[in-house]
Image (tube, grey):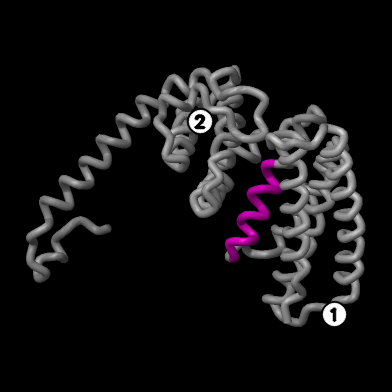
Amino acid sequence: MISGIAFEAQCAEYDLRKAHFDFTVAAVADSVENRREVLDTKLERAELHLERLRERFRELVIPVSNEKADERAIDRAALDSLEGQIATYRHEFTIGAAAFARALNNLKDAPLRHFGAKVLATRSTLVLYYCSHMCGVDVRARVADPTFVRMAKLVASVTGDARILILIAEAVASLEQHDRAAQLLYEAANLRSMPIEDLQTYQPVGYAEALGAIPELVIALARVPDIAVRAADAARDRRRRLHDHAGVPEDVTLHLPCR
């Protein structure tokens, strides 16, 4: 039987993110004081919920199969992620960074075959990046790692969260990998069905300013139109090749280029 601990921890984390959104971004009628009180209450409840989930985890039997061992590793990672999110919203960035680092370490013990684990790993890496930055620690190389970027692109495409791509673009642009950053920004615009011209003035949720006002992204934003032209050329080439082979009989398919 599945423990359900990871699911409950992620639901609690989502509830926190919603409360934090209402406090910092949403146009609501309540005063800042009332919204702060709601967020503080949510944080206290999440902390109590976390303790109950940890107690449940301690009571679980020792896993006797690889599948159960993977499940336990994901449970531990989800609990650490919830702890990290609570600390982050309290501006306890050192505690938050340590918790997300533990979450990622736990996920090393569980193959990321499940999409939920990929989402957890992606978010944990990005919030670790934020907390580490606030602590003066540089983990940009971890965010710019090609293996992580491939996984994060998958998560972004399925969840529709373009901010994943934008956050990674910031990290890689700050490492002066401007072409990679431009590609990520182009993909973020496509994910939002946004004209690339609007990227300059686009202000993602949680950002204090538009993308065009972020110094690290200036060069990458300027290169996005070139990325768009190359992408359009590649799409036309693919359509042409499909048209060229459209009427080929099945008995000569062995002579076509391998897919």
Residue 122 in magenta stretch = yes
User: Mark 2 falls on what kind of element?
Assistant: helix
Q: Residue at x 72, y 77 (%)?
A: 2
Instruction: Determine whether, in the image, residue 131 is placed left or right of residue 231.
Output: right
In the foreground, 107 or 58: 58
- State the image coordinates of residue 193 (x, y, percent, origin top left): 42, 39
- Give the residue number, with chain letter if any, for mark 1: 61
The percent position of residue 138, horizontal first and vertical second, equals 73, 31
N-terminal of the pair, mark 1 or mark 2, is: 1
Quadrant, the N terminus:
bottom right
- Mark 2 closeness class: few <14, some 14–19, many ≥20 residues within 10 Å: many
The C terminus: image quadrant: bottom left
Image position, residue 15 (x, y; %): 75, 53
Question: Residue visible at 30% across and 29% down?
Answer: 229
Residue 133, quarter of picture: top right
Q: Is residue 109 magenta?
A: no
- In which image quadrant can residue 183 be found? top left
- Horizontal side of residue 178 vs 46, given as left or right: left
The x and y percentages for residue 247 are: 7, 60
Q: Which residue is mark 2?
A: 181
Vertical placement of residue 26 versus 218, above or below: below
Whether 258 is drawn above or below 187: the answer is: below
28 sits left or right of 216 in the view:
right
Q: Amino acid at mark 2?
A: Ala
Q: Which residues are magenta?
A: 114-126
CA–CA distance between discs 1 and 2? 46 Å
Secondary structure at badge 1 equals loop
The type of residue carrying mark 1 is Val
Q: Quadrant of residue 179?
A: top left
